[in-house]
Image (cartoon, rainbow, N blue to C red):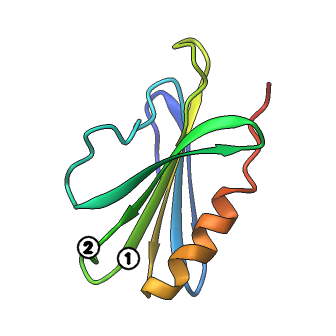
Amino acid sequence: VQGVDSCVVKYDSPACNYVGDYGSASNTLEGDGAEPGKYESIEIFGVPAVLVTYTAPVNGRWRTSVHLPRGEFTKPTLTMDASCVSKEAVPIAQALFRTIRLPQ
């Protein structure tokens, strides 16, 4: 995985594949709209975030995403996406998202 203006990482587990994009132009998930989903405003260690739980499988996999904005355009933001083999794996991916700490 190669990013243009950011650090992009990919991790695979038996239950989910994860992709992270950390940079000034990571996906905000606003108007993502490609698939129907439930959008929630949450906090992760005091940082406001957007959590998306997609309500239908995409290409046979269940997706969930999180975006942690940094407020200022000059600060990098993080977007993580998980593509899971089952609907039951989605809460596990979301629990992992809730452990993310960004540098101050």
Q: Residues within 10 Å of mark 2 (few under 14, many from 20)?
A: few
Which residue is identified by label 2?
Answer: 58
Estimate the x, y position of residue 3 in percent, counting from the top left: 46, 39
Q: How many badges with numbers are in the image? A: 2
| Left or right of 51, for residue 37 | left
Q: Residue at x 60, y 80 (%)?
A: 13
Pick whichever, 36 or 103, lies toward us.
36
Residue nearest the observer in this picture, 3 or 51: 51
Image position, residue 21 (x, y; %): 52, 43
- Residue lying at 55% horizontally and 85% vertically, measured from the top left: 15
Instruction: Indicate the secondary structure of the residue bearing disc 1.
Output: strand
In what element is the residue under mark 2? Answer: loop
Numbered tag placed on residue 85 in the rendering:
none
Residue shown at 68%/64% (left/top)? Answer: 96
The type of residue carrying mark 2 is Val
Residue drawn at point x = 53 percent, y = 32 percent: 6
Using the numbered discs, state the Cα–Cα distance from disc 2 to disc 1 in whole angstroms. 6 Å
Foreground residue, 1 or 13? 13
Quadrant housing residue 72: top right
Figure quadrant of the C terminus: top right
The residue tagged 1 is 62
Left or right of 103 in this view: 47: left
User: Are the residues at dot 2 and dot 1 in contact (C-beta closer than 8 Å)?
Assistant: yes
Q: Is residue 80 above or below residue 56?
A: above
Report whether residue 85 is seen.
no
Residue type at tag 1: Trp
